[in-house]
Image (tube, coloured by chain):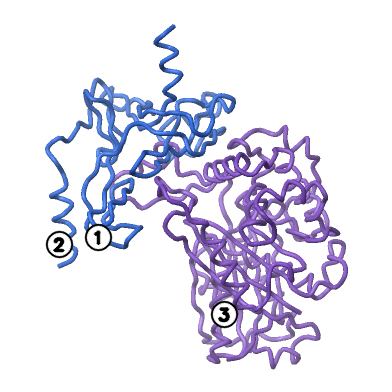
Amino acid sequence: MSDVAIVGIGMHEFGRHEGVSGMEQGAIAVRRALADAGVKWQDIQFAFGGSRASGDPDRMVSMLGLTGLQFINVSNGCATGGSALFSAFNTIKSGAFDIGIAIGFDKHDRGAFTPRIESSQGSDWYGGSGLALTTQFFGMKINHYMQQHGISHRTLARVAAKAFRNGSLNPMAWRRKPLSEDEILQAQMLSYPLTQFMFCNPGEGAVALVLCRADQAHKYTKKPVFLLTSVVRSRRFGSFEVTAPHLALEHNAGPTVDASKAAFELAGVGPKDIDLAQLQDTESGAEIMHMAENGFCEHGEQEKLLAEGATEIGGRFPVNTDGGCLANGEPIGASGLRQVYENVLQLRGDAGARQVPNDPKLAYTHVYGAPGISGVTILSR
Amino acid sequence: VLALAADGVIQGGIDSSRGQTHFMGQKSISEQILELGTNGPRLIGSRCRNCGNHVFPASTGCPRCAGFDMERATLGTEGELWAWTVQGFPPKSPPYLGESDPKKFQPYGVGYITLPGQCKVEARLTEADSKRLREGMRMRLTTVPLRRDAEGNDLVTFAFEPVESRQQEVSR
């Protein structure tokens, strides 16, 4: 069993890019990752690629070069990028190949995601009734959580203000204009208690990561970052998930808690060892809840932590240092890989104006999405 | 063989007390999930014959015990609001069948209602004021119109209304 290193990272800017297809953005990210690792496309032995809205990823070989490599498409909702990474990680761990690439890209239409629920009931009654919007779930989950655990509207605004502040320091981010907490609170209420600026938007962008056997990493880079573990979990009975026409009476903590526990166990580290984290922030409430679900604080403690600035770049536990989904938007195929890209930059010490101080050593990523799936990675330098 | 057995069970679960899809100028958005009639609207789900778990809409498999012996079940019509939000912008149409013109759109509540002994059902709420919605409030099944169809019927979907406010209206 080989350990696994990330030796090359590439990103196409997130945002809106008229006239550039999602797949073209993917190819640009791949070329940037290859250049970062100092390898040629011909050196890459395998690829896992994910995209929800921009075509079958393996078609991109016609742009990148027809080398005959093993290219497998991955489609797994919001955990598509995480699943591509999981697959690449285990392909190297198993010894099947020495060097490969995980790719994610997307280009979505404007407006809220309304997943079509395949129905044996003949009609799309769920979407037809005005249900089925992912935004409704996020509103209900954080509204319920705020009442159970004493989280205030102000704290929701603090998360969004931090995201845009961090985004303003990130040249690859979509939304780079800082907004005040009051501007965020006074914006249009989309799904109570969440306003327009508390939600991320479907967007565009691409990320590629070159991975290799850890014992060969120094051939490619002076600053390898090691992928300690990559875990994906689906939901268990009783969890509260997005686009669910019904829920069970009994309760289960959900796939994030399961994925997080498994990742810490596999990596042999605990939440207190982690220096920074990128946590799914589809909306600002999600970041708050995911801090606790991933084991980084107690439920309700976020109110105090956010007020103290603990999750700022200079705080004692920085969260979403690149601006997260709120500032970058959510191209589904690329989103989970963006988090890993940011952590690699941070662990290399290459994050520029948003560099977390004191040489961070361990970094954590978490994605969550429909229909109730979570992916976690832990990276170390 | 399993598929046939499962089909047989579902067929056998459809009972003679079946309601209507049209009632008093209303038409159900889907006869598979919502029946109308003199006794009021009813939601149709499934019950697992193995573990008793209820699901909505009807399904051929049980998410709780992984069994596949499901029977048709009529869900309860009253329960408590468990979690809620307010839909503040018009959903995209399609798929939405209601008013999607931003100038005419009226916000509506969305929540989960705990139906005792069965499950929590996600539904529209007739109340859209965040100051008047609270967890634990009693709610009752009703319908809301989405649009008028070609035959002049109101196409309706299910919703829950606060029980208290209705009593207040009656007493007024």
Rate crowding at label 3 as few (under 14), some (14 to 19) or many (20 or more) other CA atoms within 10 Å. Answer: many
Colour applied to chain A: purple
Judging from the image, mark 3 belongs to the subunit labelled A
Q: Which residue is mark 3?
A: A88
Which of label 1 and label 2 is nearer to you?
A: 1
Give the vertical position of A26 relative to B55 (above or below). Answer: below
Quarter occupied by residue A188? top right
Q: Say whether disc 1 or disc 2 marks the residue closer to the N-terminus.
A: 2
Distance from Cα at disc 3 to Cα at disc 1: 36 Å
Query: Residue at position x 44%, y 60% from top?
Result: A236
Query: Residue at position x 52%, y 34% from top?
Result: B135
| Numbered mark located on residue B68 in the image | 1
Residues at marks 3 and 1 on the same chain: no
In screen coordinates, is A80 left or right of A295?
left
Q: Which residue is mark 2?
A: B4
Residues at marks 3 and 2 on the same chain: no
- Which chain is assigned blue? B
- Mark 1 lies on a secondary structure that is loop
Identity, as a three-letter code, of the amino acid under mark 3: Ala
Judging depth in this view, the residue of A54 and A268 nearest the camera is A268
User: Is residue B71 among the parts visible in the rendering?
Assistant: yes
Give the image location of residue A359, x and y in percent. 85, 73
| Numbered mark located on residue A53 in the image | none
